[in-house]
Image: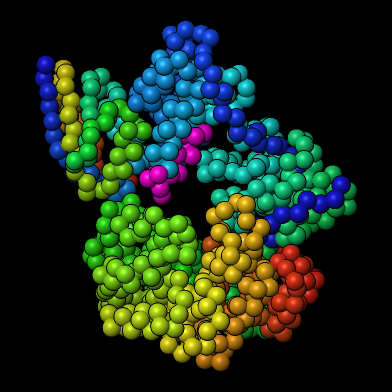
Amino acid sequence: MTQATRTVRIGSAHGLHARPAKLFAQAAKEAGIPVTIAKAGAAPVNAASILGVISLGIDQGDEVALEASGEGAQDVVDALAELLLTDHDAE
Amino acid sequence: MTALIGVGVGLGVASGPVARMADPLPAPADETSTRTAEEERQRAHEALEAVARELERRGEHAGGTAQEVLEAQAMMAEDPSLAEEIDGRIAAGKTAERAVHDAFAAFQETLTAMGGYLGERAADLGDVAQRVLARLTGVAAPGVPDPGHPFVLVARDLSPADTALLDLDQVLAVVTSEGGPTSHTAILAREKSIVAVVGAAQAGELADGQTVIVDAAAGAVTADPTPEQLAEAAERAQRRRAAASAPLAPGALKDGTTVPLLANLGKPDGAAAARALGAEGVGLFRTEFLFLNSAQAPSVAEQQTAYETLLSGFAGCKVVVRVLDAGADKPLAFLTDDTEENPALGLRGIRVLRAREQVLRDQLTALAQADAATTARGEGADLWVMAPMVATVEETTYFTALARELGIRTVGVMVEVPACALLADRILSVADFASIGTNDLTQYTLAADRLLGSVASFQDPWHPAVLRLVQEVGAAGRDSGKPVGICGEAAADPLLAVVLVGLGATSLSMAPSALADVRASLAAHDTDDARRIAAAALAADDAVSARAAARAAASPTATV
């Protein structure tokens, strides 16, 4: 089984709250394979869980680690990383 | 029926039929399920899914920001982590109702504990939980009613989630039985200029469809009014609309005495909106937004950028910035000690900044640099900086010396502690100005926690003891020739604003939406009126009679 990991720095001015968290969890859910997100030093949570993602309290500039396992894991991780790098609040 | 008495927000009046908001559902009984775990699991998942679809439908209908909020709520309903928690509880023998209740409560607790923005999301989650429970038990979901015609909303209190979705075309007025002048409902009403009476204990007796007049100026709700009363209310509402559309002018009394009207702001980007409503500057810029949700203080450069945005947005105007006010109702992870038993009386405001002086030095440096940079570009404002929660002359000396050393030209203190008000003459011999924070001054004068519902009735800035302290500061300001501003909720009350000017306030700062009412109220009175009305209020025994005495002393034309 393919596994992929990637570390990214959050781009959204308000971190992973509200709208960015929603967009991210939605995308993770649609990926169809298990994806986790973890803040440095903390336990990973299910990336498709908006409550899990929000309660990480991730702010702009924080580093997070994404991990996916399954079909197309690398593409999934890259697409999600792209989302995290974007400043959605600037749109 | 006699009028119900509560605390009015602003001076508006409105009438219409009552629509009541249902009370929250009780917690389901913690009993062993008589169904199989699989049956309970299916019930729970059916309800979660149905609520998610319903929220999405509402979102499509609402559009805009409300749609974002509702879609996020729909995702919460179908959250996989939440589903795991629910399934686990059902497997342990709980009913679907209880499992849903407990699992949501656990997540809410986590979010509430994280505070600030995430705390508000806890309310969103609570709203979802109520909808799912309502679905499971076959009752209507609590929430803002939708009778299909404009209505007067009657509720215990409104949560942030309720207020976010209020359809302002349908809500004629809001009446709550709980909550004081600083509740979410009151803050929303003030921001959106909704006619509201909060904390009207007997509002629970109002029935759906009953006609009421909501008179915020009188803080009263009249049920089943006469046709004459209705006509009078309609005429007053009309006069008020005319005042609101009056041209913007600088704040002044009828005799021309200027009383600059300033805005309370919490973010630098509110400048344009505040100026459009006639703000002549900023009387209280709260800097906490820079620090909330941070594990550490923002850098000098980050702060400077935000302050430059603020100052250039008010180029040529006065801008009063309050340095970080952490502690009590505004805890900050990296600064405050959350184990204090009584944080309102603990290490907060200037006390905590002094204990962590580098944070204060950085903030003052960032402010001085932003001032210099914007001035060099020709878009500078008149920057004043003040410290929160100052209690002593010695603290005043400390803060003014440090701020001047770091390049701040105009340095003042907030008067929120009675000790500071009582020694205002000596405080003002050191500081360049004073600004009275009426919310905290009231809490400390009456010894009543402003966040505690059980003592909310004490939180009334009309109390003559509070007014007498304002008078002390006003007199000290007059004697020393130094400005005394007001930057609490009190300044947004149009009649109280006149009283405060009568007591010696030289400028008033408030939520920008309150500016029009206060401007109209000031323009209807001259200096002698203001002093006479203030004297009437000061002579009263309590807040209710002070308000009544002031109203009686005010000229009838002032009732906009």
Residue at 58% x, 65% y is B447
Residue B376 x %, y %: 27, 78
Residue B57 x %, y %: 50, 26
Q: Residue B383 vs residue B161: left or right?
A: left
Residue at 67% x, 69% y is B463
Q: Which residues are magenta?
A: B113-127
- Quarter of the picture containing the C terminus of chain A is top left
Above or below — where is B252 with respect to A5?
below
Residue B346 appears in view: yes
| Figure quadrant of residue B74 | top left
Above or below — where is B364 with respect to B174?
below
Magenta segment's dominant SS is helix
Q: Residue B457 vs residue B515: left or right?
A: right
Residue sitting nearer the eye, B416 or B152: B416
Above or below — where is B68 with respect to B425?
above
Residue sitting nearer the eye, A17 or B358: B358
